[in-house]
């Protein structure tokens, strides 16, 4: 029996994936990057799009090619190593960083401006309410497409279209000269800035959430699942690119209305108020609340789905546990949370990229099991050096590494490891098997 979805369901699946991606980091980082890039906005935006749109899209495709699950994607890694990696990623995109950040950004940009004297108690109350709503939506997995893809995301997209149209029709200033690294290496700086969205990590897990949602719609065949997963990824990527281009242009033309802003949320808030006057904050609040809420729902659902599969606790119990944890961590504060997350991202992003790259070249690897182990080890070792540098540790002894000065010392060694593994034949695998016997 041929399995198929109606065009409205295909669009809804794509919208759901887009909504899962479009959250806190997607909104707060591009405006400030655009302002700092100024006249170099085009190369900076190109670098950002590579990591914030290109990598998540490629990752979803890799998941589809591999078979649609984390187990398929990591079948050549030791099971324990694959589980540890999955747990670390889920902790990062779940209760440790990404999910609490959605609540923090929603509060800072959508609620706090309405209070003259906002205090820690306001944040505490809001975070509890925000994640209670997110938990209620995540409670029933089977309704995610209908609730998010057909209701919340279209409302979000309408708000984004209104904002983008206003930005391009009525920019609030001229582009200034680029600042800092955006003046000397805008593409690389934009590329690294794209790490902050955490979307490559998210796509590793959202892809499996989409597969689960498709199964609940009756799509179980591998070929049909792959086709609809890639279709959803293309729709989500197009939506993300539209949002990022708009926000980068907004930032690039914001110097006169948001001078001195130290984060993208402030840039966006001041720009929108300049565009829409007293109603600007209302428009922004609606967009931010919807964007952050849909992402929080996706993150809690994806994490609960995985943790319930490796523990005795049910999906719904994990939804409650993670929701409470996110509300607690959200009270740390946005600036502190971002500063804590950067070294972790520098350590694990290259490992995720290496895993995706290996999926595409697997058929060229003579000994996949050895290749996966060696390449992942190399990527992790050199990524840890980059992470140590970002954390302030003196690692000047590694300055001779290619691209180390721009925070990508992992790239060349990892690429070299992949190339080398293409020349190791299956005879080596047989030798290892004999030695282990």
Image (cartoon, rainbow, N blue to C red):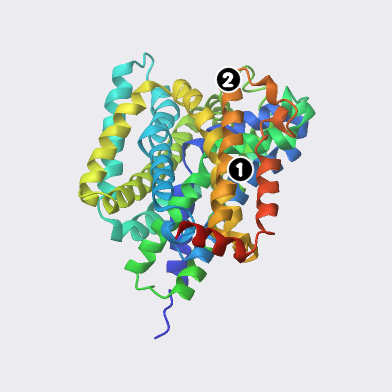
Q: Describe residue 189's horizontal placement relative to residue 39 as left or right.
A: left
What label does residue 262 carry, if any?
2
In this view of the protein, which residue sits in the foreground, 319 or 355?
355
- What is the distance, in whole Å, between disc 2 and disc 1 at their CAs? 19 Å
Judge whether residue 126 can be spotted in this image: yes
Q: Quadrant of the N terminus?
A: bottom left
Q: Describe residue 399's horizontal placement relative to residue 15 as left or right.
A: right
Q: Residues within 10 Å of mark 1 (few under 14, many from 20)?
A: many
Q: Are marks 2 and 1 in contact (CB under 8 Å)?
A: no
Residue 12 locus on image (x, y percent): 44, 62
Q: Residue at x 36, y 62 (%)?
A: 212
Q: Is residue 144 above or below residue 216?
A: above
Q: Quadrant of residue 210?
A: bottom left
Asked which secondary structure carries label 1, the reply is helix
Q: Quadrant of residue 88?
A: top left
Q: Describe residue 310's horizontal placement relative to residue 208 as left or right.
A: left
What label does residue 283 carry, if any?
none
From the image, tell me which residue sits under label 1: 244
Q: Is residue 193 above or below residue 295?
A: above
Asked which secondary structure carries label 2, the reply is loop
Q: Quadrant of residue 116?
A: top left
Residue 226 locus on image (x, y percent): 49, 69
In this view of the protein, which residue sits in the foreground, 58 or 395?
395
Q: Residue at x 37, y 42 (%)?
A: 296
């Amino acid at each position: 029996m041929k399995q198929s979805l109606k065009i409205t369901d295909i669009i809804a699946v794509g919208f759901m994936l887009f909504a899962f991606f479009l959250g806190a980091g997607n909104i707060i980082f591009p405006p400030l990057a655009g302002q700092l890039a100024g006249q170099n906005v085009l190369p900076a935006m190109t670098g950002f799009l590579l990591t914030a749109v290109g990598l998540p899209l490629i990752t979803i495709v890799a998941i589809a090619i591999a078979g649609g699950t984390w187990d398929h994607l990591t079948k050549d890694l030791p099971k324990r190593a694959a589980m540890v990696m999955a747990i670390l990623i889920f902790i990062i995109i779940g209760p440790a960083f990404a999910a609490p950040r959605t609540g923090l950004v929603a509060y800072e940009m959508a609620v706090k401006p309405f209070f003259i004297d906002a205090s820690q108690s306001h944040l505490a109350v809001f975070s509890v309410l925000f994640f209670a709503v997110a938990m209620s939506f995540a409670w029933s997995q089977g309704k995610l497409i209908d609730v998010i893809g057909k209701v919340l995301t279209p409302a979000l997209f309408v708000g984004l279209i209104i904002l983008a149209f206003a930005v391009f029709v009525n920019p609030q200033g001229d582009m200034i000269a680029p600042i800092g690294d955006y003046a000397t290496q805008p593409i690389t700086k934009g590329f690294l800035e794209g790490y902050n969205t955490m979307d490559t990590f998210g796509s590793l897990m959202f892809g499996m959430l989409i597969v689960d949602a498709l199964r609940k719609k009756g799509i179980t065949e591998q070929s049909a699942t792959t086709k609809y997963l890639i279709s959803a990824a293309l729709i989500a990527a197009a939506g993300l690119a539209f949002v990022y281009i708009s926000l980068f242009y907004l930032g690039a033309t914001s110097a006169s209305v948001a001078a001195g802003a130290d984060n993208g949320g402030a840039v966006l808030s001041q720009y929108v108020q300049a565009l829409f006057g007293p109603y600007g904050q209302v428009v922004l609040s609606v967009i931010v609340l919807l964007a952050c809420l849909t992402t929080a729902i996706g993150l809690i659902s994806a994490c609960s789905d995985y943790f319930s599969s490796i523990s005795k606790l049910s999906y719904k119990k994990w939804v409650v546990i993670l929701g409470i944890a996110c509300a607690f961590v959200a009270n740390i504060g946005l600036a502190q949370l971002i500063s804590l997350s950067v070294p972790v991202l520098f350590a694990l992003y290259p490992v995720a990229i290496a895993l995706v790259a290996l999926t595409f070249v697997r058929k060229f690897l003579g000994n996949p099991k050895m290749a996966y182990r060696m390449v992942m080890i190399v990527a992790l070792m050199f990524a840890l050096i980059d992470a140590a540098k970002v954390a302030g540790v003196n690692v000047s002894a590694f300055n001779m590494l290619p691209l180390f000065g721009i925070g990508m010392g992992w790239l060349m060694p990892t690429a070299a490891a992949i190339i080398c593994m293409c020349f190791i034949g299956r005879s080596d695998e047989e030798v290892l098997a004999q030695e282990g016997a």
